[in-house]
Amino acid sequence: MIKNFTLTQKIYAGFFLVFFLSTGFFYLSINKASALEVQYPVLSGINLNTEANLTLPKYVLYLFNAGMFLGFFSVFISITIAGAMYFLSPVSAELRADAKDRFFGAMSGLLILVLTYLIITTINPQLSIFNPNKLPSAPPPPAAKKAPGVYFYQSDCSDNSIQPNTSNVPDFGALKNKINSANIVQDADNGISYISMLYSNTNLWGQCQEVDPTITGCQSLGSFASKSSSASIYQYDFHPENNNPSDGGVYFFRKSCFNINGQNAYDAAGLINYCKQNSGGYLELKTSDIGGGYESELEKLKFTNVPKEEQNCTGYDNNGNCVNKNPPTLGGENISSIIINGNYFILLVYSGPNDPDHGPWTSCQEFPTPYDANKTGPQQIKWQNIRNSSGVVPNYVIVVPIRGY
């Protein structure tokens, strides 16, 4: 019958069919209750008779399955009728031709149905069940893992072009006084942890602040942000007792102890023995004393082996004669030389009454300095430079074990 329609009639029929289906979908998405008034048969496990199942994707899936079922059923009926017509073709010659036309038409319809289903499932298997909320997508690329080290930034830590620092930065150069935040990326895979101190002056001295190694991710430098000019960066040693010699440690001497008599600068043990006999007293911090880190007020530490005549008098008799003497402390300007035997860095700190516990601190001097090629420490501390630069002298000492460098 449709074959007798004109082209205009076919266009109008197609338009009304599309309009009817669109109106039905729109109405269904707005008013589910009215759709539930119809008792739908259960098809392919989909029951539209419940509120939970009556969603637009499931409704479209239901129509798709119903359409495929009706299409294949129509093909089956058409082939059956074509067979019957072909069987009765001896009665009428026209039946044979009609049977062939119906059969080929049914096969064409079957081919269209099969291709439709294959195209849908090939594009995406999820499309065959009309579930747009579960369309599989390519997994997101793994986040780029930052290389271990210490990162310094002018603003926040979002600049991925910044490269990690794994050794001392004696001068920030163009970044001087512009660093506002930092990020320490620890090397957990290899058991390596980084520690860092920031300084207001180049070459690791002046006001200083610790970059907290316990913070994961970006950390603001607070009030110290506009003062950073250099930074020391070390790998922390969790087991210094396994790496330092049996006589390793840090030694503080009352008098300057120079490398004299051809003493080999790399022979720390020989230099230490010489200085013990000629420095007028010393303090020895052994590896066992330092452990994972050592901190003390200098006034609480005293030199040993100080000649009696050079000790401080702490008691007098009625005639004004000294009757009690004690060795001097390491406070004030009493330290003249430091020898480092092993892998340590030393921080002499002046912590003012208003300074936070973890910095920034008013004045700091780190040893060994960038100029110490042998990394054995200063054979003569120049206190006049420290006084002239900050107006104060250190009142604390911090010793930290580090990995070999």
Image (cartoon, rainbow, N blue to C red):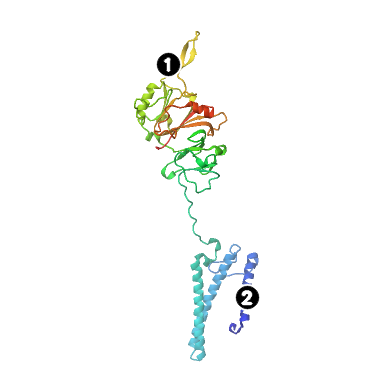
The answer to whether any part of residue 215 appears in the image is no
Q: Position of residue 238 (x, y in %)?
A: 42, 37
The quadrant of the rendering that contains the C terminus is top left
Q: Amino acid at mark 1?
A: Lys
Front: mark 1 or 2: 1
Residue 54 occupies quadrant: bottom right
Q: Secondary structure at mark 2?
A: helix
Which mark identifies residue 308?
A: 1
Left or right of 192? Residue 102 is right
Closer-to-camera residue (176/392): 176
Q: Which residue is mark 2?
A: 15
Q: Position of residue 404 (x, y in %)?
A: 39, 37
How busy is the neighbourhood of tag 1: few (under 14 within 10 Å), some, or many (20 plus)? Answer: few
Closer-to-camera residue (161/343): 161
Q: Position of residue 318 (x, y in %)?
A: 50, 8
How busy is the neighbourhood of tag 2: few (under 14 within 10 Å), some, or many (20 plus)? Answer: few
The CA span between labels 1 and 2 is 115 Å
Residue at position x 62%, y 78% in the image: 11
Looking at the image, residue 64 lies above or below residue 227? below
The quadrant of the rendering that contains the N terminus is bottom right
The answer to whether any part of residue 127 appears in the image is yes
Residue at position x 55%, y 72% in the image: 66
Q: Secondary structure at mark 1?
A: helix
Upstream in the sequence, badge 1 or badge 2?
2
Q: Position of residue 157 (x, y in %)?
A: 53, 45
Looking at the image, residue 382 lies above or below residue 159? above
Which mark identifies residue 35?
A: none
Q: Amino acid at mark 2?
A: Phe
Residue at position x 47%, y 15% in the image: 313
